[in-house]
Amino acid sequence: MSNDATPVFGTLALERPDQGVLFVVSGPSGVGKSTLIKKAMARIPGLEFSVSATTRPARPSEADGREYHFVSPEKFTALVAEDALLEHAAVYDKRYGTPRAPVEAAMSEGRSILLDIDVAGARQVKQRRPDAVWIYILPPSIPSLEQRIRARGDTSEDVIRRRMAQVGQQLAGAREADYVVVNDDLATADAVFVGVFLAELVRRDRRQKATERILAS
Ligand code: 5GP
């Protein structure tokens, strides 16, 4: 049930929280993070994806402003100097950062937002916004992760070696995040992942408007 005073939050008809929730998702390369994110975004359509700025070139399937804002290294440096980024980090020699203004606007309007960022970036977000919810995706084991990266088949041995070297640093996030989702069986991981979003969205301290309205009815 919804009316003008109670906007529907996505197709689940879940009312928007009093303040938008900032969700941060990270995990090592090859863990299946983007599949889980896509599935969750489809299930909770009110959730918005934050489009990062990056200095890496666009892949053929990517469009500027959709997957990323593709910017020059000079432009990126200017964004950092202006404090226009909520966080930023270097990943595989390229720079990535989250534009701050759209995140802050969304949250103040009760819209929730999802950041797909690396562990260094996630730490910065938690420092600046302790109310952010950090979810870490873990593989069932480290050898299985290397297997998955190799099975993709579209990466050279050199890239695989560099990715595995980065994995060590990224895995530390599993000890720091608020939630850990193990992506072994996809259906299970998907259900657990979506469950985290839903649980956070219905925390009592984020539901005061809806609660009081119902209690006063
Ligand atoms: P890709 O270049 O494959 O799209 O992304 C490489 C890595 O960069 C991924 O692990 C992704 O999570 C991370 N990443 C993407 N956007 C951002 C961002 O805005 N900030 C940070 N810190 N990492 C990001």
Image: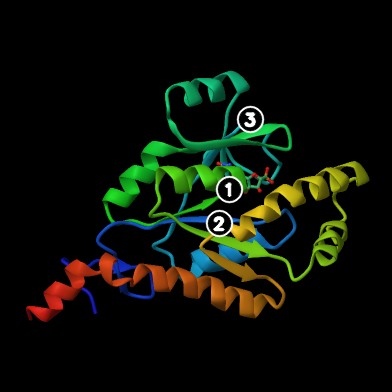
- Asked if labels 2 and 1 touch by Cβ distance under 8 angstroms, the answer is yes
Residue found at x 82% / y 57%: 149
- Does residue 109 appear anywhere in the picture? yes
SS at mark 2 in the image: strand
- Asked if labels 3 and 1 touch by Cβ distance under 8 angstroms, the answer is no
Q: Position of residue 33 (x, y in %)?
A: 64, 60
**How far apart are the alpha carbons under marks 1 and 3?**
15 Å
User: Is 148 displayed left or right of 208 in the figure?
Assistant: right
Residue type beneath disc 2: Val
**How far apart are the alpha carbons under marks 1 and 2?**
6 Å
Residue found at x 55% / y 71%: 193
Tell which quarter ligand 1 is in. top right
Residue type beneath disc 3: Thr
User: Is 195 displayed left or right of 21 in the figure?
Assistant: right
**Quadrant in the picture for residue 6:** bottom left
The residue singled out by tag 1 in the image is 117
Q: Is residue 130 above or below residue 75?
A: below
Q: Residue 55, which numbered label?
A: 3
The residue singled out by tag 2 in the image is 25
Q: Position of residue 32 (x, y in %)?
A: 69, 63
Sequence-wise first label, 3 or 2: 2
Q: Residue 89, which numbered label?
A: none
**Quick check: is the Cβ at mark 1 less than 8 Å away from ligand 1?**
yes
SS at mark 3 in the image: loop
Most extreme residue toward the left is 216
Q: Quadrant of the C terminus?
A: bottom left
User: Is 46 displayed left or right of 166 in the figure?
Assistant: left
Q: Quadrant of the N terminus?
A: bottom left
- Does residue 97 appear anywhere in the picture? no
**Quick check: is the Cβ at mark 2 less than 8 Å away from ligand 1?**
yes
Q: Position of residue 121 (x, y in %)?
A: 56, 43
